[in-house]
């Protein structure tokens, strides 16, 4: 039995004209006729109207396909790091970013950076939490190829490695790392004895490279922490945790201070913790 509709369904020929000829999205059609998107989706299936693929939709929109041709500035390095953590590259040369709707502004920042005119769609998961997400996706063979050359590829989660000097030049490494931490890192409070804690998740190979980079910031001090297994399994999924408030703040200061692109809530949290710690750690005054 189909879903009950409390609106007057539009006729098949009208829907076909809007969807196939005028190439309007289900979202736009729903808004035009005062319906819900799922109701339009239901009618498309009921009328057996063929769905458009992303490649067809892309004909209407544009993007800077060569954006990731070479990492030669801070912004590109940042977005590469963020895509390492939270982006996706899929079969069919699709590139995209999907974040909780509360971080929709960050998806908009990415869209602006790559000069994309593609729409950002809001959708809900079917799980228990019924979470809303903001999603930007488009087809780009050139960008897919460039991202793969930069170490960001399909099914990357358990295979990522820390980028080489050829992939991300040293002068842009802190921007890459900030992007990765904005995606797969957390800034937390560990209690009275640990007012600031930095934790980053990833593969063993990526985190070992990240640890080496952190040590260049802390030198002559260093991080002695061993990587932690995130789950009781054999998957290449680890975490690097810094319980030292001083070390965490020094690293965050290097990454976020004066940065031009960042996840707003992470930067705000860094600034808050910085203000709190400067009053309790005299050696951090001026950082």
Image (cartoon, grey):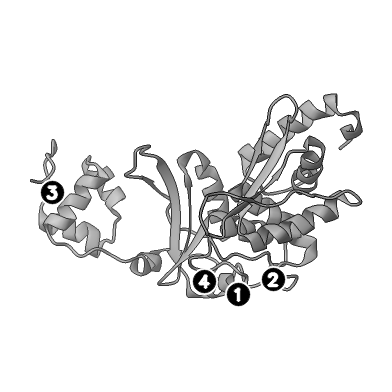
- Comparing marks 3 and 4, which lies closer to the viewer? 4
SS for dot 1: helix
SS for dot 4: helix
**Residue to which mark 1 is pinned:** 149
For image coordinates 71% across by 59% down, the residue present is 208
For image coordinates 17% across by 50% down, the residue present is 42
Residue 33 seen anywhere in this rendered image of the structure? yes
Between 59 and 285, the residue placed more toward the observer is 285
Is 119 situated left or right of 204 in this image? Answer: left
**Residue to which mark 4 is pinned:** 144
Q: Earlier in the sequence, mark 1 or mark 4?
A: 4
**Residue to which mark 3 is pinned:** 10
- Comparing marks 1 and 4, which lies closer to the viewer? 1
For image coordinates 59% across by 60% down, the residue present is 84
SS for dot 3: loop
| Residue 77 in the image, given as x and y percentages of width and height | 68, 61
Quadrant where the image shows the C terminus: top right
Asked whether disc 2 touches disc 3, contact meaning CB atoms under 8 Å apart, the reply is no
Between 196 and 109, the residue placed more toward the observer is 196
Task: Say how many tags the image has.
Answer: 4
Q: CA distance from mark 1 to mark 3?
A: 47 Å
Disc 1 packing (10 Å; few <14; some 14–19; many ≥20) = some
Is 27 situated left or right of 216 in this image? Answer: left
């Amino acid at each position: 039995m189909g879903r009950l509709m409390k609106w007057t369904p539009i006729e098949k020929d009208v829907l076909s004209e809007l969807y196939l000829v005028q190439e309007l999205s289900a979202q736009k059609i729903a808004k035009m006729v005062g319906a819900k998107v799922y109701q339009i989706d239901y009618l498309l299936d009921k009328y057996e109207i063929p769905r458009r693929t992303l490649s067809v939709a892309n004909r209407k929109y544009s993007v800077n396909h060569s954006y990731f041709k070479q990492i030669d500035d801070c912004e590109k390095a940042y977005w590469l790091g963020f895509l390492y953590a939270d982006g996706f590259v899929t079969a069919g040369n699709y590139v995209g970013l999907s974040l909780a709707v509360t971080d929709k502004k960050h998806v908009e920042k990415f869209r602006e950076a790559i000069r994309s005119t593609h729409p950002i769609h809001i959708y809900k998961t079917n799980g228990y939490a019924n979470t809303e997400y903001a999603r930007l996706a488009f087809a780009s063979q050139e960008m897919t190829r460039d991202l793969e050359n930069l170490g960001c590829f399909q099914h990357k989660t358990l295979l990522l490695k820390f980028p080489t000097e050829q992939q991300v030049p040293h002068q842009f490494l802190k921007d890459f790392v900030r992007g990765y931490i904005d995606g797969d890192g957390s800034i937390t409070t560990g209690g009275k004895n640990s007012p600031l804690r930095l934790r980053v998740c990833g593969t063993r190979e990526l985190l070992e490279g990240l640890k080496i980079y952190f040590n260049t910031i802390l030198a002559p001090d260093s991080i002695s922490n061993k990587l932690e297994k995130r789950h009781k399994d054999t998957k290449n999924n680890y975490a690097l945790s810094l319980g030292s408030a001083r070390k965490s703040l020094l690293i965050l200061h290097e990454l976020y201070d004066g940065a031009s692109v960042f996840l707003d809530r992470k930067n705000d949290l860094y600034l808050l913790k910085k203000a709190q710690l400067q009053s309790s750690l005299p050696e951090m005054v001026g950082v």
